[in-house]
Amino acid sequence: MSTPEHLAIVRKHYPNAISTITAVDRLFDLLADRYGLQPGKMMAADSLCCDDVNTIEYPPRAYEMLGPFKLGGLDGYPFAGLTGMGAFAAHVPDDGAVFVYHGPHIGVSKDGSLGSILRIGQVKSSGCCGACRAAVKKLQAGEIRAGEVTELDHQQNTIEQIVLAAKERILAAGDPMKEATEVMQEAISARIDLLAARTTYNAKYLILMGAVHINGDHDMGSYTSVRRLLVKDLRTGETREHVGELLGAG
């Protein structure tokens, strides 16, 4: 469970981080105040890594939302594609909203280590996100070949191609794992935007919340470093950015 001490550890790496529960509570307050939206009118999807640690901690009222529909594969990249986004869009209440929480994840352990966590029942920490960590190791070793995406390991190979395209940026960073996570965050947001632009939603609003999702050790809870909170009025096409309002609350 999140405590002030745990949050302080996470904020050494991500200064704007807040607990996942706090983020969702603030989101609901904002949407109710600004748009008159209640959780029961929202169809949720997430594009997060399929890692078992990414069961999001929701406050009680979040369970009024419909869903969530799962768009993400390894490290949160939306491998469900247009078909997944289209299927999700068909499930939305006509007078409600589409909500998509998306981003890569990374671990922060109690000792402040980045890129690994202690999982339930284990005595040694393990990689988080393991897929991103493996891709970075291959990048550092020069073992990723441009264009090599295989049928047997399609998702991991896709992540490798994304980090390869940012090779100089990642290898020059003080913490290549952290920088690769930022690269993935940008790639995921760009792909979500593309999928959303090519999808028709039978709803009033499209809400996109992009972040780096942060996993702590098994007793630390989870956190989010929110990078954007876009609300698009699907009737007028107007889009508003609310991330400052969300992070400035409380």
Image (cartoon, rainbow, N blue to C red):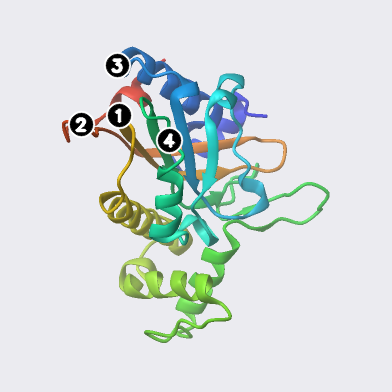
Task: Tell me the mark number nearer the camera, choosing from 4 and 3.
Answer: 4
The residue where tag 4 is placed is 92
Q: CA distance from mark 4 to mark 3?
A: 20 Å
Q: Secondary structure at mark 4?
A: loop
Percent of width and height locating residue 172:
35, 68
Q: Secondary structure at mark 2?
A: loop
Task: Tell me if residue 12 can be seen.
Answer: no
Q: The disc labelled 4 sits on which kind of residue?
A: Val
The numbered disc on residue 235 is 2
2 and 1 marks in contact (CB < 8 Å) = yes
- The crowding category of the residue bearing disc 1, from other C-alpha atoms within 10 Å (few below 14, some 14 to 19, many at least 20), is some
Q: Secondary structure at mark 1?
A: loop
4 and 3 marks in contact (CB < 8 Å) = no
- Please, is residue 210 above or below residue 71 in the view? above
163 vs 152, nearest the viewer: 152
For the C terminus, the quadrant is top left
